[in-house]
Amino acid sequence: MSMSATVQAGAVPGPAKDHRTALRLGRRRHRVNLLVKLLCVLATVIGLLFLASILLTLIWRGIAGLSITVFTTNTLPPGSNGGLLNAIVGTLIQTALGTLIGTPIGLMVGTYLAEYGRHSPMANAVRFVSDVLLSAPSILIGLFIYQLCVEPFGGFSGIAGCLALAVIVIPIVVRTTEDMLQLIPPSLREAAVALGAPKWKMIVLICYRAAKDGIVTGVLLAVARIAGETAPLLFTSLGNLNWSLSLSQPMSSLPVTIYQYAGSAFDDWVQLAWVGALLITVGVLAVNVLARFALRGGR
């Protein structure tokens, strides 16, 4: 009698109440999920718009100055119809040598952290230093190499620029190598060891092959980073208006040339700065595309 009176008074039984609560919570979750999805899509569109704006601006301002002279003539005084040959060659040399010096060191350090050191005090200290270098401003690295290689030897040089770029490469390769090796399932290592393979062979033949894509991606990120660095080169290789392939002498580079030309009052130098920026962007993009095709072909 009391239950009937309660139902007639408008009270909702337990199961029905739980069902309505579940529906209400489900609708709220759906609205929150839709809101977050819309925000993610909006952020993606905004990022793509900024990227497209930068690329279109580079193409529009840079392609107007592209000519055969850019690739066959050295940098010259304003109004002399100069090019960027020495800067292009200098950038290729310094970027290539910086990558060749820094990549093996970063690869070996990352391998030590992932395979040998793990959580030892030494590994933790190395990991901390690597993370500090990864976030350090590049101008500080340039000042470090200046004190280490430029001032004691009495002059700027291309090899000092290569060393500065190599120091930037090392922590990037260390981080990506360690992360990729840690993602490899322990069963792969155990299978190789069970077959009698020594640890070094297991790392080289099994782990490196499994982590190949990630490690190459890290190297490409490092190349993209150092290809456009200006501050370290200002304190090390400085720049050179003349043709020079000597690593013991100041060496020209596209980033430094862009820095000098972009703020110039001469229209031809400003135009060459846009051309140089376009060349760096296209060069980094081409390296990434070629590396991806090479990795796919090797499978």
Image (cartoon, rainbow, N blue to C red):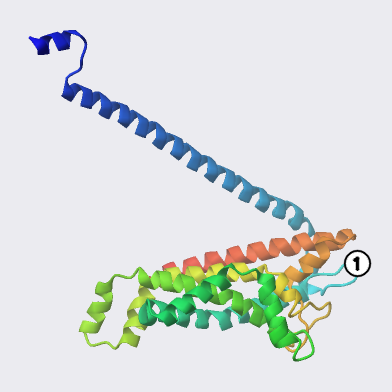
Instruction: Determine crowd level at label 1: few under 14, some 14-19, many 20+ residues with C-alpha closer than 10 A.
Output: some
Q: Is residue 269 left or right of residue 109?
A: right
Q: Please, which residue is most extreme toward the right here?
A: 79
Q: Is residue 37 left or right of residue 162?
A: left
Near-viewer residue (154 or 119): 119
Near-viewer residue (23 or 174): 23
The residue lying at 16 percent from left, 12 percent from top is: 6
Number of numbered tags placed on the structure image: 1
Is 23 located above or below residue 296 in the figure?
above
Q: Is residue 99 left or right of residue 119?
A: right
Q: Which quarter of the rendering shows the N terminus?
A: top left
Is 46 located above or below residue 219 in the figure?
above
**Residue 87 in which image quadrant:** bottom right
Q: Please, which residue is most extreme toward the bottom here?
A: 153
Q: Position of residue 100 (x, y in %)?
A: 57, 82
The residue lying at 68 percent from left, 73 percent from top is: 140
Q: Position of residue 233 (x, y in %)?
A: 72, 75
Is 243 located above or below residue 291 in the figure?
below
Q: Is residue 291 left or right of residue 77?
A: left
Residue 290 in sight in this render: yes
Q: Which residue is mark 1?
A: 78
Kindly identify the amino acid type of the residue bearing the numbered disc 1.
Pro
Q: Position of residue 72 (x, y in %)?
A: 78, 73
